[in-house]
Image (cartoon, rainbow, N blue to C red):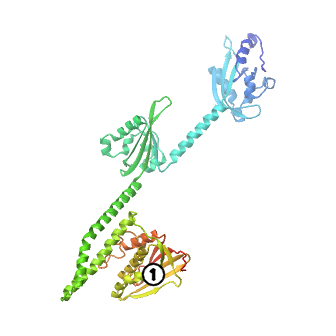
Amino acid sequence: MNYQAMAVDAATGDVDDSVFRLLVDAVSDYAIILLDPDGRIRSWNAGAERIEGYLAEEIIGRNFSIFYPGDLVAEGRPAHELGIAAEAGRFEHEGWRLRKDGSRFWADVVITALRDAGGRLLGFSKITRDLSERREQDELLRRSEERFRLLVEGVRDYAIFMLDPDGHVASWNEGARQTKGYEAEEIIGRHFSAFYPQEQIDHDWPGQELQFALARGSFEDEGWRLRKDGSRFWASVVITALHDDNGKHIGFAKVTRDLTERRRIRILEDEGRRITTFIAMLGHELRNPLAPIMNAVSIMQLEHLESARLRMCRDIIARQLQQMVRLIDDLLDVGRITSGKITLDFQPVPLAEVVNDALEMVQPMIDQHQHQLTVSLAGEPAWIMGDRARLLQIVSNLLNNAAKYTPPGGRIAVTLRRTGGNAEISVRDNGLGIDPRYLKDIFNVFVQVTHQPEIGGLGLGLSLVQQLVTLHRGEVSAFSTGEPGKGSEFIVRLPLITTSVD
């Protein structure tokens, strides 16, 4: 061990070093040195050599300010510390110190004034411990806690805050501010029951939640909560009981998420399912009485009626009955598609035949309204993989709409063409047209193209067209300026297939 001490008598201020040597030799983790009253180093132990980096012969006799960074020396910190130790008897501090190589280390320093029996200051003992590793761990922990704090405070989608054991708000993050509307200074210290509707407070639901969380470790709930402005929102809440290392209860963590929009969507989806079920039931119930009515009308059509008025009434019943059957079939199809119960029989289908068959179905209505019909079919065969009956339903619905919404004597143009890898069916008319504001909604269920009651309909046809086209991996678009006489155009695009017929 490199150690030096000056042994002189008490009259000259020197001390016997025998006991001091025993003490110092037993300790290696501490730098233990003696300073004279002016701060000059008078002894040096192995711990000092290890921590500070100097050999005894390099450092004894120099002022201890050599261990201090330049800024602290400039402030007069070394002399200040000796002054406090001389006056108070002791000075303790943690801070940066320097090694011989200029590197810094975090030191715990204790300076003690040494006096003789008469109270004369003989010098100082200085004990230094290197706490760099502990400080590094503390700093890592502090940074981790700071990052976690910043993370929690920065979260916007969740209200994350702490409650004390009695339920008073102890912290507040940005998500809590946005969700509940309170600034931190407005809510910290208040009881968290401020977020609950009065009917829940009357039943002490906030208190019961804390009891459940304490008993079970955590508690989850969904229900109405209040914002600062008194408005309600649907919240998902998780309350977790917190305990320290000794198991003592220190409070609760509370995480709240605003699920109002999700709840609204869920309600709409549930309502949609109920409507679909109702439509399916309604369609079946209406179907039952129609069968005997259709049979009765068929028998009436076989009989010769002398009365022109009776014949007119019979024919009106027959036409309106066909309309009712079509509407009910649409209702049933909407229900089947929405519930996923529709089954398609996919086969190679030539679209030109589908268009011709659809025209044949709608021809009586076109003739009745004296429409000018133009048909242009692709020069090359256009085959797709699809369900022929459903494809016929798609085209006939579009033609039906064109005939229905085009005034007598109007024009209807049907075009089938190939564009790249797709087949396109266009149905264009010069009828009433569609207000461009409503084009984005035109394929929704129960949306009417027009509000003219004499035209009628349930607003199911275009919705069925879109859903059936989608099931065929295609798309349908509607175009209209909304100007009278310029009508509208519907284009169905379906993927082509290659067949031996091509």
SS category of the residue bearing label 1: helix
Please give left or right for residue 413 compared with residue 33 in the image.
left
Q: Is residue 442 above or below residue 227?
A: below
Q: Is residue 140 above or below residue 298?
A: above
* Figure quadrant of residue 449: bottom left
* Figure quadrant of residue 398: bottom left
Residue 412, visible in the rendered structure? yes
Q: Position of residue 219 (x, y in %)?
A: 41, 40
Please give left or right for residue 486 compared with residue 112 in the image.
left
Q: Position of residue 438 (x, y in %)?
A: 40, 72
- Please give the name of the residue rendered at 78% of the width and 15% of the height, measured from the top-left corner: 6
Question: Where is mark 1, residue-wise?
Answer: 353
Q: Position of residue 48 (x, y in %)?
A: 73, 24
Q: Is residue 217 above or below residue 333?
A: above
**Which residue occupies the foreground of this view, 233 or 230?**
233
* The N terminus: image quadrant: top right
- Please give the name of the residue rendered at 46% of the width and 30% of the height, measured from the top-left corner: 248
**Which residue occupies the foreground of this view, 126 or 336?**
336
- Please give the name of the residue rendered at 30% of the width and 41% of the height, measured from the top-left corner: 203
**Which residue occupies the foreground of this view, 282 or 34?**
282
Residue type highlighted by circle 1: Glu
Q: Which residue extends farthest right?
A: 57
Residue 483, visible in the rendered structure? no
- Please give the name of the residue rendered at 49% of the width and 28% of the height, measured from the top-left corner: 246
Q: Is residue 105 above or below residue 202?
A: above
* The C terminus: image quadrant: bottom right
